[in-house]
Amino acid sequence: MPAQLLDGNAVAQKLLAATREEFAGLDRPPRLVAIRANDDAGSRWYARAQAQHCAANNLEYTLDELGATATREQILAAIVRHNQDETVAAILLHLPLPPRSDYLELVAAIDPRKDAEGAHPVNLGKLLAVGKNGAKDLLVPCTAASAVRLAQEAGAWAGKKAVVVGRSAIVGKPAALLLLGLNATVTVAHSYSDVAAECRAADLIIAATGASGAAWNRYRAKLAQWRNGGGEKPLPPDLSPLIKKEMVKEGATVIDVGVNQIPRALDDHGEPVKNAKGKPEMLYAGDVDFAAVKEIAGYITPPQGGVGPLTNAFLIRNTVAAAFHRRRV
């Protein structure tokens, strides 16, 4: 029997309704500021989506466009300006950042009370400290919180084995901490782990690696090096999903957080197949082989409408929570 789909859109609506009820009484719409210092197409799309989500939920949205040539000092100055602006409830940084910009340094410069994405070291530290009791004013990493919230739709996790595949500071590690707060037995698997063995024993898998996208980027770099006369021509990479059917226990819950931009196919020369306009045909894929895994899993996130919509809802929640608690102080 195919797995039941976890509807991120439906859960997002529930979270937004709870947010409106929990933080009722604000005297003006909270304002979210996004700082953007790139000309990346994905970032442009994300900014438009953020503006739409904010408008739909009675939030103000400001995009601070610094340009792809912005310096570290200019980005820091923008952060300081918005930190000091009492009309700003929350701040986030768009990726990618310009070369020679340190993401961790820049995130740490944001006032932790205005940290829309829950990525500031202070907020990550709070997540480590609060344990299972939680904290109403905690600003949580949005994607990690979304993955765990969707897992809760599938059931309770106390005493069950959860595997988080990926150990990033803003998804894998926070997701593991949130699962510990639900009394799950948590393993964090990574590139040095026997990922297949860990997953086969898991009641819950949260995949958050971007493995095939990373493999594609490594291949491109080696290909460029070869074209410049360095080394041998690299072999085409394996761009198949990391989590395959044989790695999943029957009835397990599988949450796919991965976002990989990879070629739709490679030609005989290991190059991306091009469209009629001569441009490489690219697609976005997850970390999980959805078509195969859905035949054995109990619950699974769909390729669209899973973690994404709920991540946007958590961004709204963090912004509103930041505004609410700052105005109470």
Image: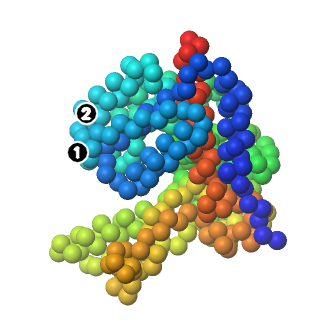
Q: Which of marks 1 and 2 is nearer the N terminus?
A: 1
Q: Indicate whether 26 appears above or below 172.
A: above
Residue 259, position as x, y percentages in the image: 51, 59
- Which residue is pictured at 47% across the width and 35% down the height? 61
For disc 2, the marked residue is 74
Q: Which of 262 and 108 is in front in this view?
A: 262
Residue 118, position as x, y percentages in the image: 52, 34
Helix, strand or loop at mark 2: helix
- Which residue is pictured at 56% across the width and 11% down the height? 329
The answer to whether residue 269 is left or right of residue 177 is left
Inspect this view and state whether residue 154 appears: yes
Label 2 neighbourhood size at 10 Å, few (<14), some (14-19), many (20+)?
few
For disc 1, the marked residue is 69
Q: Which of 73 and 130 is in front in this view?
A: 73
The answer to which image quadrant residue 274 occupies is: bottom left
- Type of the residue with mark 1: Thr
Q: Which of 13 and 69 is in front in this view?
A: 13
- Type of the residue with mark 2: Gln
Disc 1/disc 2 C-alpha distance (Å) = 10 Å
